[in-house]
Structures are given as structure tokens and as C-alpha cells.
Amino acid sequence: MTTKKKQPSKNQSPRRVGNAVFIRTVTMHYTGKIAAVSKDEILLVDAAWIADSGRFGAALASGTLSEVEPYPDGVVSVAAGGIIDVCDWRHPLPRTAK
């Protein structure tokens, strides 16, 4: 008997380890790959602070951001209490200052 592999839901939360994301908080924006998730934080690697996304919808669609400041070691912890939303980032993570 063969078992079917469960297909991920299109409505699955982007808060998954290994997922590249764009996070908006009450004061800042970030991109990065989720390394860990807890009730208190999301730990990002290959992370950057996005000083200016430009037009938000266009940035998500194209991957083009107006101002980027990568974390030198690429690691940041984002406090869960300040998160407004988390979106899938379907582009290469920005690692060069712009």
C-alpha cells in the first residue's frame, strides 16, 4: 500500500522554520530566513533591516526594496509581541546595503 505525501496548504502560515519572510513590526521591517520560532520571538538568519520597502505590494511581488541594511552577522531576534504581519518572501534575501 502506498501512502500519499500530504501537500502543504496554500493557507499555511509563513511562520515556519526554513521559510524566507518579510516581517513588519510596529516600528521596523525585516527580511530573513526563519531559524527558530517561539511564543516570544522569531529568530532570523541572513537577516536585513528594511529601512524603506518602497511600494509594499510592488516590493513583495518583485523583490525590489528601496533601502536595505543587512545585519553584519546575519542574525536577529524579532520580538513576537511587536509583529504586525509576516509574509512569504519569494525572492533572494537581500544581503547587500542599498
Image (cartoon, rainbow, N blue to C red):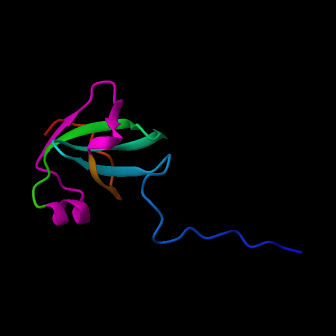
- In the image, residue 75 lies in the stretch drawn in magenta: yes
Q: Which residues are magenta?
A: 56-82
Total count of labels: 0
Spot occupied by residue 17 in the image (x, y as percentages of width and height): 50, 46
Q: Which quadrant holds the N terminus?
A: bottom right
- In the image, residue 24 lies in the stretch drawn in magenta: no
- In the image, 98: left or right of 20? left
Spot occupied by residue 45 in the image (x, y as percentages of width and height): 39, 35
Q: Quick one: 12 or 70, which is closer to the camera?
A: 12
Residue 74's quadrant in the figure?
Answer: top left
For the view shown, which residue lies furthest in the right direction?
Answer: 1
Spot occupied by residue 23 in the image (x, y as percentages of width and height): 28, 49
Q: Write the residue at 70% across / 69% down.
A: 5
Q: Write the residue at 26% across / 38% down.
A: 48
For the view shown, which residue lies furthest in the top direction?
Answer: 73
12 relative to 93, above or below:
below
Q: Write the residue at 45% across / 60% down.
A: 13
80 relative to 9, above or below:
above
Q: Which quadrant holds the C terminus?
A: top left
19 relative to 44, above or below:
below
- In the image, 54: left or right of 37? left
Q: Quick one: 38 or 77, which is closer to the camera?
A: 38
Residue 34's quadrant in the figure?
Answer: top left
Q: Quick one: 76 or 74, which is closer to the camera?
A: 76
Q: Write the residue at 48% across / 51% down.
A: 16
46 relative to 26, above or below:
above
- In the image, 90: left or right of 97? right
Spot occupied by residue 57 in the image (x, y as percentages of width and height): 18, 66
